[in-house]
Amino acid sequence: MKEEAYLHLLATIVKNARRAEDANRAKSDFISNLSYELRTTLANIIGIAQLLTMDCLLPTQQRYVTDILEACEAILPVMNRMLNLSELEAQHIELQSCTFNLKNLLEKVISQLSYQAGMRGLQLILDYPKDIPLIWVGDPNLIYHILFHLSSHALINTEQGMVVIQIDSPIKESASLNTEIICSIKDTGKGMSEAELLELNTCFKQFNPQESRRYKVFNLGLAIILGYLRVLKATLKVESTLGKGCHYICRIPLQELKEEPHIETRITEKSNLTIFNDVTLRILLIEDNEIIQRIYRLLLERKEIFYDIASNAEMALNYYMQNHYDLILLDIALPDSDGIAITKIIRQQETDKEHIPIVALTAYGQPTDQQQFLQAGIDEVLVKPIKVEQMDHLLEKWIRLKSKECLDLT
């Protein structure tokens, strides 16, 4: 009888464990799909509103469009925090380790928040001293989310003035390698009382995301930050004076890379689109959403860029086989395939002397999704909704790179 009871108990434990694993997997799929649907819809709204701003509108119409963009900007950080918190609670956050450019990461944070800062009339400044190394080893995704949430919170609580992101390293003058960076975020906002500050710093020391939810000053963002800090074994301290802003000091363990890794540069076969001294890109846009197609088409035409548009994988591969492109803009979710499969086919077709940069423009915004895209051979990932300023920056970057290649060849 005891043996039967033991076997029954063991079977029950195994069954419950499998149910829990299935539930976690289902939750992960739900989060990913929810992220995709929300970002796609928001991308359409923001894109159409930004197209309207390019037309000649009456002052009242311009105000309405601005109100739409402001509402979307308010929704976006809440949506991101909700999705990040759900991922955190599903226990899918694992510490990754890779080399990355810290300054580029911070510039990405600045880029993502620049529109929010501009709408509020605030300055968003990055102070990255020249003597601080650029290349570090650590988890760039978690670091990005921590600094993004802190910076966003600083902007929300600042009515006038500026938010400054500053990087330091405690032993930067030492001959040994740095093993920590200090990122401080200062705002000129309303600040906190002594009681609020004491409670908040106590919460940070305890690393309790559940307890943090009662602090309305941070809402969802605090729980996310605490979870990521725990994974990174980082610390966060807040200094503040009521009426004089806040100072967030985040110490993150990282390993300085003494020498920047060598990256092989492969030149894409040119498509003879250099006219006189002007450099023009030829781009293959792979996107099935008609609204987003119209948005990207207008941006490309404004910069006099040659382009082809494919609405599915079959059309995209036909274009690829018949033409030479300098850049491919790729949606991940397509009606007949996915962007990962297309990327693998393109990479298999390439020779040693050519490499077509592929930039994913996707509504899948989870860090695990982005890591999967990069591992498949995609060069860069932009998460929808993508603002006009981001797309302009992307196109200008690749035009500059092609200009440099053309100069090197002459």
Image (cartoon, rainbow, N blue to C red):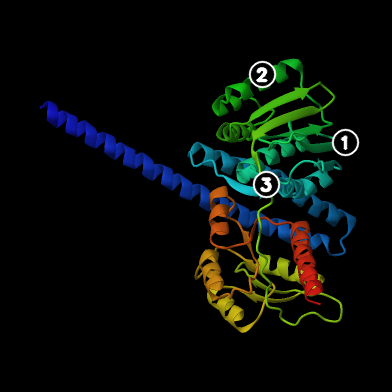
Up-down: is 67 above or below 294?
Answer: above
Which residue corresponds to mark 1?
161
User: What's the residue type where badge 2 is placed?
Assistant: Glu
Disc 3 element: helix
Up-down: is 398 above or below 251?
Answer: below
Decide if residue 211 is on the left or right side of residue 11: right
Image point (58%, 22%), residue name: 206
Which residue corresponds to mark 3?
76
User: What's the residue type where badge 1 is placed?
Assistant: Gly
Q: Where is residue 82 in the image (x, y as percent from the top left)?
A: 59, 41
Mark number displayed over residue 45: none
- Residue 304 at least partly seen: no
Q: Residues under labels 2 and 1: Cα distance? A: 26 Å
Q: Position of residue 267 (x, y in %)?
A: 69, 72
Residue sitting nearer the eye, 394 or 90: 394
Query: Which numbered disc, 2 or 1, marks the residue that appears first in the sequence?
Result: 1
> In the figure, residue 315 lies in which quadrant?
bottom right
Which residue corresponds to mark 2?
199
User: What's the residue type where badge 3 is placed?
Assistant: Leu
Disc 1 element: loop
Q: Where is residue 14 in the image (x, y as percent from the top left)?
A: 28, 38
Q: How many marks?
A: 3
> In the figure, residue 133 lies in which quadrant?
top right
Q: Nearer the viewer, mark 1 or mark 3?
A: 1
- Residue 197 at least partly seen: yes
